[in-house]
């Protein structure tokens, strides 16, 4: 039931985002290859390489490294587009990056699995079709539905999008509160053995990679920095659970810890910057 509530909140938010998208916006990065390559370099080369280095060097709790590697190759968090534009990112860049990251993740995730198995000797029961289903349900289908509403019902789409946005925010907030109440002890249980510190380090460096490679537009730099650390938790959970099925408490606790840190830490850094 909790999973369904969270899924409903995400779907409604993404539908609301889709109603504000113009048909040409998702193709923006295809028309600007340098920006697309820099964005992918930050998200799918530097971020995974940095996490692989940390996981290889540090004696982390079993399952923690798998979660961090999962986040490093997962696509952008589904409702992130709203945050990306709030940070000043161009709407066409934000939507295009959301879709591009979803497509690229389908290629990068199996590659990361192969690299992790070779470097760390950890096999996984991860099912690629499970990832495809998650991305279709949380990103592609609701975004396409929102875009279709805006195209075929331009008069009603803004009102429908606003309703979906408000309702999705409420549902997702309620689901998040219940999620933290149920699994809060798991977050506290993973704080030791450097888990909190390495999570913060990963997020800080991810923000740095995005800022450095986001180009001259300060809004796009902020959006890419946010996108580099705001990754899909369900993909990280699928990857880590497949590799360490016996460490479910640690995996869930680390996923939630990363999510909280990736929300709170950028806000603190932005206030310090001001």
Image (tube, rainbow, N blue to C red):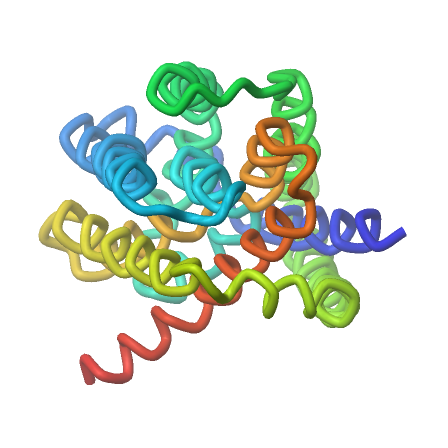
Which image quarter is the C terminus in?
bottom left
Q: Hey, which quadrant is residue 109 in on the image?
A: top left
Outermost left residue: 216
Q: Quick check: can you spot residue 25?
A: no
**Residue name at image x 72 percent, y 60 percent:** 168
**Residue name at image x 28 percent, y 83 percent:** 271
Relative placement, left or right, of 253 versus 226 is right
Q: Quick check: can you spot residue 263?
A: yes
Q: Nearer the viewer, residue 121 or 127?
A: 121
Residue 248 % position (x, y): 68, 44
171 vs 20: above or below:
below
**Residue name at image x 22 percent, y 83 percent:** 272
Residue 144 % position (x, y): 62, 33
Residue 69 % position (x, y): 42, 37
Relative placement, left or right, of 209 versus 92 is left
Residue 126 % position (x, y): 62, 21
Q: Nearer the viewer, residue 56 or 130?
A: 56
Q: Nearer the viewer, residue 108 or 80?
A: 108
**Residue name at image x 19 percent, y 49 percent:** 209
For the image shown, how many numbered marks are present on the structure?
A: 0
Q: Hey, which quadrant is residue 213 in on the image?
A: top left
């Amino acid at each position: 039931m909790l999973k369904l509530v969270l899924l409903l909140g995400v779907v409604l938010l993404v539908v609301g985002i889709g109603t504000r998208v113009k048909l040409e916006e998702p193709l923006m990065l295809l028309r600007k290859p340098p920006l697309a390559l820099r964005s992918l370099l930050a998200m799918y080369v530097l971020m995974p390489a940095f996490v692989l280095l940390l996981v290889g060097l540090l004696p982390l709790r079993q399952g923690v490294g798998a979660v961090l590697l999962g986040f490093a190759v997962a696509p952008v968090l589904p409702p992130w587009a709203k945050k990306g534009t709030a940070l000043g990112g161009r709407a066409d860049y934000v939507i295009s990056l959301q879709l591009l990251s979803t497509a690229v993740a389908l290629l990068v995730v199996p590659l990361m699995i192969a690299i992790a198995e070779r470097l760390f000797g950890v096999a996984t029961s991860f099912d690629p079709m499970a990832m495809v289903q998650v991305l279709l349900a949380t990103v592609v289908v609701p975004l396409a539905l929102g875009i279709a509403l805006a195209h075929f019902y331009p008069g009603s789409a803004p009102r429908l999008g606003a309703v979906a946005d408000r309702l999705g925010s409420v549902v997702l907030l309620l689901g998040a509160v219940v999620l933290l109440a149920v699994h809060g002890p798991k977050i506290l249980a993973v704080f030791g053995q450097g888990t909190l510190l390495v999570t913060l380090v990963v997020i800080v460096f991810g923000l740095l990679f995005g800022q450095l490679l986001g180009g001259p537009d300060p809004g796009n730099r902020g959006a890419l920095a946010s996108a580099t650390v705001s990754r899909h938790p369900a993909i990280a959970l699928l990857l880590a659970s497949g590799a360490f099925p016996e460490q479910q408490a640690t995996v869930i606790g680390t996923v939630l810890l990363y999510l909280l840190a990736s929300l709170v830490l950028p806000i603190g850094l932005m206030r310090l910057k001001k």
